[in-house]
Image (cartoon, rainbow, N blue to C red):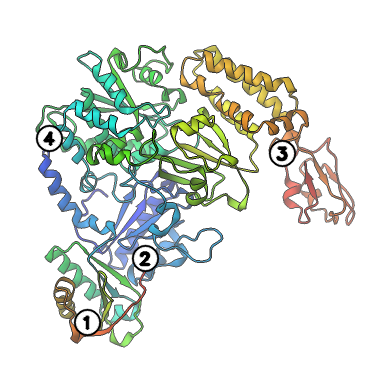
């Protein structure tokens, strides 16, 4: 490693922030993939992996991705909840990688709910 | 461990690797965590980050799950497989490892909602728990070395000193001398060569502020020193750190190596004409080395004995050259002041004591740990709101501040605001930041004896007032605790204390009577109970205790008879027992065994 310049401080910050921004605990949106036993066997793992890949590809660093337990409707798994800042959470059901990619682009990044995949809208307390 | 975490994660597990948690096996926990994450295929989306001390040492090992901020405590390697499966795989945070305040029924899942954390103000410890202290990039990503860049390219050395002066920063090592003024005195000393020193020889019993700062954020200390060196005109510095701090030393060595690699130590830093080198000097853990001239003697390879001042180190210090010494916490304050400005800093605190202070909170307190609070906070807030009160709902008796050089502040002064002036006025000192909480079961004479025993051991022996005076004080205190003291001994305590204060060369001797004088002042009745009534109200001084059996309460179960080591208790079954005081060794085992509350201690 060569000596760094003052400009390099900013470059290092940008590079490292990609991972450390997670520690600030704030984001413009939060996606919860429901990963109870039912969700995992229905393919929630794949949904999670798809999201992680897309985050990497699209360089998204201000969306919180988390998992939670079974959402209660095991027959409609895999499911995910999208919470945009200051908006009611939206639950999506019967997901596959293609659908979650669309939800990410249109809802999380675009702000427009993908109505045909929506299961329910409403408040839910999530840790 | 040092592979760059450059992939985006879903979760980051911030696992505390301060000395407290490490001794409770946090490295072993990391091992099991990583194994379990791998087993469930979670290793690519969840990373374990080892951080510095986050302060809540009472319930370590600690882990905060980000971004959710869920706080787990008292972890063991056995529970990790369950935790990984439940929370990290299935997304169900596990309540039983979350924090539940004593006397409350529900857990507090998030770190930001726990009083111990939410009531603190972090300036020095702003990176604690948020960065891996062994990665310079993570320090930089939190704004690190921007202050140095500003100081080197946008400020003159005089401007830096003015900024520190305007901020009102005072030495955090004990004396509270204005830092900017100290730098200016050294800068103005005419000499080609100048040195700066970081005093990391934290020696107060029960104090671990500086160790934790170095362990959690070593680059903040280095950056502070770099800025100070630029202001003063030094090109070489020493960090004097005690032998007992291996983890802090290791992290410091890693930080120095990484800073060198980036050219932040060495020649032409950031392409300017500024050069600076820093060395680690390992001390042998002598308390007297906290004193500046002793510390300098120790670096030079001489026995650590203080020298007459003047000349002050700012005129003639290390190897005879002008030298500026500040302690770890003082240096670590500097980058934030330069970065955010003197005005921002001076808004925190009281009229004459600016900024925050890091305290190690120990003793009879629920939330033992490391806290950073604004100057001007009350003792009550520290003990009850942050510290969570006294275990077992015992009564708060006194707060000892400033270590062996400080004094005891009684509970009735609980609403005293903590700053340099108020503590001094109350007969104690700010010191480096040790806070020892005492409850009703603490005997103040015993406490004074403990501290004088410590300073008597640590006295370098150069001045007879300190060397012999401390022993004379100790002998009287021992007499008081054993019941053989007379009333005139209390006057003698004061007289000797005054002589030790007046005739000793350095701070060690000048302050060693403080624990005696402050307890004598605030708890005179307790001293008198020992001397005149041969009674220890807190029931600590063994020689003054008398054990007896309440005949009305004793059912004659013989439990105490069986437990008594010298067989001092006699009595038939189902009849009241008796203690033979000539045989009793006052061990307290009968008290422990008796289920009927029949043992009396007076």
- Tell me if I can see residue B394 in this picture: yes
Residue A17 relative to residue B86: left or right: left
- CB atoms of marks 1 and 3 within 8 Å: no
Residue B106, how many percent across, how many down? 49, 66
Kindly identify the residue that appears in the image at 49 percent across and 18 percent down: B460
First in sequence: mark 3 vs mark 4: 4
**Vertical side of A114 occupied by B128: above or below:** above
**Label 3: chain?**
B
Q: Is residue A26 left or right of residue B350?
A: left
Which is nearer the N-term, disc 2 or disc 3? 2
Contact between labelled residues 4 and 3, with CB atoms less than 8 Å apart: no
Residue count near mark 4 (Cα–Cα under 10 Å), binned few <14, some 14–19, many ≥20 = many
Q: Is A6 situated left or right of B132 in this image?
A: left
Q: Residues within 10 Å of mark 3 (few under 14, many from 20)?
A: many
User: Around disc 2, counting alpha carbons within 10 Å, would you say few (fewer than 14), some (14 to 19), or many (20 or more)?
Assistant: many
Labelled disc at residue A95? 1
Would you name the residue on which mark 4 appears? Answer: B270
Q: CA distance from mark 2 to mark 3?
A: 51 Å
Which picture quadrant has residue B192? top left
Residue at mark 2 shares a chain with residue at mark 1 = no
| Residue B84, label in figure | 2
Q: Which residue is mark 3?
A: B537
Chain letter of the residue carrying label 4:
B
Chain letter belonging to callout 2: B
Give the secondary structure at mark 4: helix
């Amino acid at each position: 490693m060569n000596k760094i310049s003052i400009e390099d401080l900013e470059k290092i910050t940008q590079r490292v922030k990609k991972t450390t921004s997670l520690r600030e605990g704030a984001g413009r949106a939060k996606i919860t993939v429901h990963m109870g036993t039912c969700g995992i066997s229905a393919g929630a793992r794949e949904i999670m992996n798809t999201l992680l890949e897309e985050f990497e590809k699209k360089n998204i660093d201000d969306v919180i991705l988390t998992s939670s337990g079974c959402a209660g409707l095991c027959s409609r798994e895999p499911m995910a909840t999208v919470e945009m800042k200051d908006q009611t959470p939206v639950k999506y059901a019967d997901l596959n990688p293609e659908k979650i990619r669309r939800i990410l682009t249109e809802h999380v990044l675009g702000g427009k709910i993908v109505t045909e995949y929506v299961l329910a809208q409403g408040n839910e307390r999530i840790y | 461990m040092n592979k760059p975490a450059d992939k985006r994660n879903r979760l980051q597990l911030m696992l505390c690797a301060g000395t407290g948690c490490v001794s409770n096996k946090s490295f072993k926990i990391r091992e099991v965590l990583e194994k379990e994450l791998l087993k469930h295929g979670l290793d690519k989306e969840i990373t374990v980050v080892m951080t510095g001390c986050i302060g809540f040492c009472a319930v370590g090992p600690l882990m905060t799950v980000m971004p959710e901020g869920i706080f787990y405590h008292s972890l063991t390697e056995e529970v990790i497989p369950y935790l990984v499966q439940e929370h990290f795989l299935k997304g169900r945070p596990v309540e039983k490892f979350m924090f539940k305040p004593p006397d409350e029924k529900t857990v507090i899942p998030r770190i930001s909602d726990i009083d111990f954390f939410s009531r603190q103000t972090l300036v020095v410890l702003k990176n604690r728990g948020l960065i891996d202290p062994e990665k310079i990039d993570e320090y930089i990503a939190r704004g690190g070395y921007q202050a140095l860049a500003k100081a080197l390219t946008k400020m003159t050395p005089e401007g830096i000193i003015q900024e520190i002066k305007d901020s009102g920063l005072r030495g955090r090592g004990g004396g509270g001398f204005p830092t900017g003024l100290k730098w200016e005195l050294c800068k103005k000393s005419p000499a080609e060569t100048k040195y700066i020193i970081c005093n990391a020889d934290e020696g107060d019993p029960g104090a671990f502020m500086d160790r934790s700062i170095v362990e959690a954020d070593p680059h903040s200390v280095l950056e502070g020193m770099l800025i100070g060196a630029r202001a003063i005109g030094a090109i070489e510095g020493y960090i004097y750190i005690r032998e007992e701090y291996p983890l802090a030393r290791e992290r410091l060595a890693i930080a120095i190596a990484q800073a060198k690699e980036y050219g932040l130590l060495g020649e032409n830093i950031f392409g300017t004409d500024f050069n600076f080198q820093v060395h680690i000097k390992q001390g042998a853990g002598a308390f007297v080395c906290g004193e500046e001239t002793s510390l300098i003697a120790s670096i030079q390879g001489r026995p650590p004995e203080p020298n007459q001042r003047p000349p002050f180190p700012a005129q003639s210090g290390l190897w005879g050259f002008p030298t500026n010494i500040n302690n770890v916490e003082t240096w670590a304050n500097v980058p934030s002041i330069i970065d955010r400005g003197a005005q921002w800093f001076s808004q925190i605190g009281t009229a004459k004591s600016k900024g925050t202070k890091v305290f190690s909170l120990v003793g009879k307190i629920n939330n033992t740990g490391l806290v950073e609070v604004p100057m001007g906070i009350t003792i009550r807030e520290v003990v009850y709101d942050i510290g969570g009160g006294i275990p077992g709902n015992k009564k708060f008796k006194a707060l000892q501040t400033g270590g062996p050089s400080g004094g005891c502040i009684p509970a009735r002064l609980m609403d005293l605001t903590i700053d340099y002036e108020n503590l001094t006025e109350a007969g104690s000192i700010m010191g480096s930041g040790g806070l020892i909480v005492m409850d009703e079961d603490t005997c103040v004479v015993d406490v004074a004896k403990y501290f004088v025993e410590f300073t008597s051991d640590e006295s370098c022996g150069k001045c007879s007032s300190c060397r012999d005076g401390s022993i004379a004080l100790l002998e009287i205190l021992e007499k008081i605790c054993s019941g053989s003291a007379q009333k005139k001994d209390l006057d003698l305590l004061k007289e000797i204390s005054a002589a030790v204060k007046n005739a000793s060369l350095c701070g060690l001797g000048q302050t060693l009577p403080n624990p005696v004088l402050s307890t004598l002042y605030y708890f005179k009745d307790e001293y008198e109970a020992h001397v005149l009534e041969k009674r220890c109200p807190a029931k600590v001084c063994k020689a003054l205790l008398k054990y007896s059996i309440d005949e009305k309460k004793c059912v004659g179960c013989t439990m105490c008879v069986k437990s008594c080591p010298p067989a001092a208790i006699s009595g038939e079954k189902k009849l009241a027992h008796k203690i033979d005081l000539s045989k009793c060794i006052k061990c307290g085992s009968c008290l422990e065994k008796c289920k009927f509350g029949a043992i009396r201690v007076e």
